[in-house]
Image: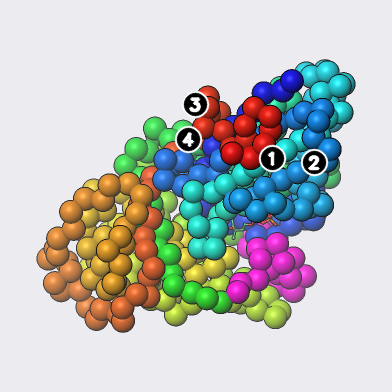
Amino acid sequence: MSDIVTVIAPVNIAVIKYWGKRDEKLILPLNDSVSATLDTSVMCAKTSVCARPDILENEIWLNGVHSSFCNQRLQNCLTEIKAIARNQKSVTDEFLSWNVRICSVNNFPTAAGLASSAAGYACLVAALAKLYKIQSDISKIARMGSGSACRSVYGGFVRWHAGVNPDGSDSIASQVADSSHWKEMRVLILVVADTKKHISSSKGMTCSVETSELLKYRVEHSVPKRVKDICEAIKDRNFSNFAEITMKDSNQFHAICLDTYPPCVYMTDVSHKIVEIVHKYNEINGDVKVAYTFDAGPNACLYLLEKDISDVLSLIRHMFPTSSNEFVKGLDAPETNKTDVLKDFPMKPLEKDLIKYVIYTKVGDGPKIINDESHLLDAQGKLV
Ligand code: DP6
């Protein structure tokens, strides 16, 4: 009989964005991208998997809901892992013939539009790789589930190399620096109150590849230099360079979204206010202290150093009044007190509750196997 394997895996937030595929089926990108992996103690996906002879068909539960296994990306990941296991003879043919049961949950709201598919696929692939005992680069397999998932396979700062091979064999992620390299780096995710249904990343990027002229320029001219420069900034722990490149790349990505026909509008008025506030704050300080970046939605992800957390949280509370008594979630936030900078801050506070809440987190490690028996499936492979 088989054991249950349980894994937790992190979210990652790109500082050089992946936007555009050269192969839709294998999920091969047009350009390299770079991200930071976030601490699993604050946000993570958790997945339990098992294979048994008495499971009649492959089954999956996502956040407690029995979901369809007829998902091509999910099937591609399972097929690839089984093919590697068959090749490496890492498990018996009998084990390979059994069906699987998968149960996956996120400890953060998927509806908040946070990078849930990246954590989810990295987690699933890490768990299946362990179940089938394969020795392989799992970033390549996670990529087949969702492009950005390949970066969640490693901790710290991670680069996804676009690669050139048509079979995707060189389209893999690698670590630029581990999570202990830049210990002071912190992240604030500003979850913007928003009810709009957004165009999915997949659909949006397909449309950009077909219609945006700016995208071609970005891929050929902007990204290669930015990737090189930001990797150097990470290695040198040069925050102002890191921050400037991050903001410029987010802005260019959203310019491409607007250059797409019909346009993909992800940022809202609140997102643009956050951009304005960050630039004002940096200007007043005479130094780049905070960087923003936005994915395919209105939420802002701010990168900053630990020494500035208290001041920046004061600024956010001041500019975005809240009626929530649990406004800052995640790591223990330091006491916030109004600083001199805040008294002279040249912008008026905005109306209440434009930001739902803030997640305070930091850079963390890659997927971890959980051995504490807190599985999502019991010994018979049933949901707990
Ligand atoms: C804007 O990885 O979600 O977050 O490969 O189609 O699953 P698929 O797309 P996905 O795209 C993420 C796009 C992004 C930028 C990034 O994370 O690099």
Q: Is the residue marked by circle 2 packed among few (<14), some (14-19), or many (20+) residues within 10 Å?
A: some
Upstream in the sequence, badge 1 or badge 4? Answer: 1
* Mark drawn on residue 365: 4
Q: Looking at the picture, which amino acid does disc 1 mark? A: Ile
User: Toward the viewer: 273 or 233?
Assistant: 273
Q: Are marks 2 and 3 in contact (CB under 8 Å)?
A: no
Tag in front: 1 or 4: 1
Upstream in the sequence, badge 2 or badge 3? Answer: 2
How many angstroms separate mark 2 from mark 1 (CA)?
Answer: 8 Å
Which secondary structure, mark 1?
Answer: strand
Tell me the residue that label 3 is attached to. 372
Q: Looking at the picture, which amino acid does disc 4 mark? A: Asp
Vertical side of 73 occupied by 50: above or below: above
Quarter residue 339 falls in: bottom left
Give the magenta-colored segment's residue range.
197-221
Tell me the residue that label 1 is attached to. 102
Where residue 40 sits: x, y (%)? 46, 41
Tell me the residue that label 2 is attached to. 58
